[in-house]
Amino acid sequence: MNKEEQVMLRFRELFNKLTWLNKLKMEDALREHTPSEVHCIEYIGNHEDANVTRLAETFYMTRSAISKITKKLMEKGLIESYQRPENKKEIYFRLTAEGETVRRIHDDLHDEFRERDRAVFDPITERQFDGMLRFIEQYSEHLDAEIAKLDESVKPK
């Protein structure tokens, strides 16, 4: 196995371990909500004027899928829709008090996970972080370009 394959394998293993480990506490604390719902709540709480299009782009989901999720979140009383006076066409979302509670629980869990993992991150130097971040950014930009190519090839002519 070459280094590239090793890196990709280790990324997958790391992601799977992290997901599995965090999932136990997340599901216990947020059992009434799907991961997609919680991530939408997080995004809406952190971004002003969140709408279906922005959510779909952020989560690489269809607008239809996001519409279903936001409808459920409104039915559960976690978000509400609104329109801006200068733009009556677009519908935006914001958290309700109950939605803010879910967001806070989610944020607290992430803080707990960061604290748990501090032993790994504390000894890493700025230079090491910079190198890792550069690699991640380069790879992300490459994937963005590949997604853009795919988007072009599937658009109706």
Image (spheres, rainbow, N blue to C red):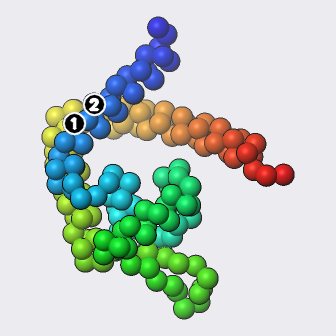
Graded by Cα atoms within 10 Å as few (under 14), some (14 to 19) or many (20 or more), the crowding at tag 2 reads: few
Farthest residue in the bottom direction?
A: 85
- Image spot of residue 142 (x, y percent): 60, 36
Q: Is residue 20 above or below residue 10?
A: below
Left or right, residue 152 beside residue 92: right
- Image spot of residue 107 (x, y percent): 24, 58
- Image spot of residue 67 (x, y percent): 50, 65
Does the residue at mark 2 contact the one at mark 1 (Cβ under 8 Å)?
yes
Write down the residue under mark 1: 21
Q: Is residue 99 above or below residue 120?
A: below
Identify the residue shown where x is 29% and y is 38%: 19
Identify the residue shown where x is 36% and y is 59%: 37
Q: Is residue 17 above or below residue 68?
A: above
The image quarter in which residue 8 lies:
top left
Write down the residue under mark 2: 17
Q: CA distance from mark 2 to mark 1?
A: 6 Å
Graded by Cα atoms within 10 Å as few (under 14), some (14 to 19) or many (20 or more), the crowding at tag 1 reads: few
Q: Is residue 123 above or below residue 148?
A: above
The image quarter in which residue 78 lies:
bottom left
User: Residue 43: in sight, yes or no?
Assistant: no
The amino acid beneath tag 1 is: Leu
Looking at the picture, tell me which residue is in the foreground, 146 or 59: 59
Identify the residue shown where x is 39% and y is 78%: 80
- Image spot of residue 120 (x, y percent): 21, 32
How many labels, in total?
2
Left or right, residue 96 beside residue 55: left
Disc 2 element? helix
Disc 1 element? helix
The amino acid beneath tag 2 is: Lys
User: Residue 129: in sight, yes or no?
Assistant: yes
Identify the residue shown where x is 27% and y is 30%: 17
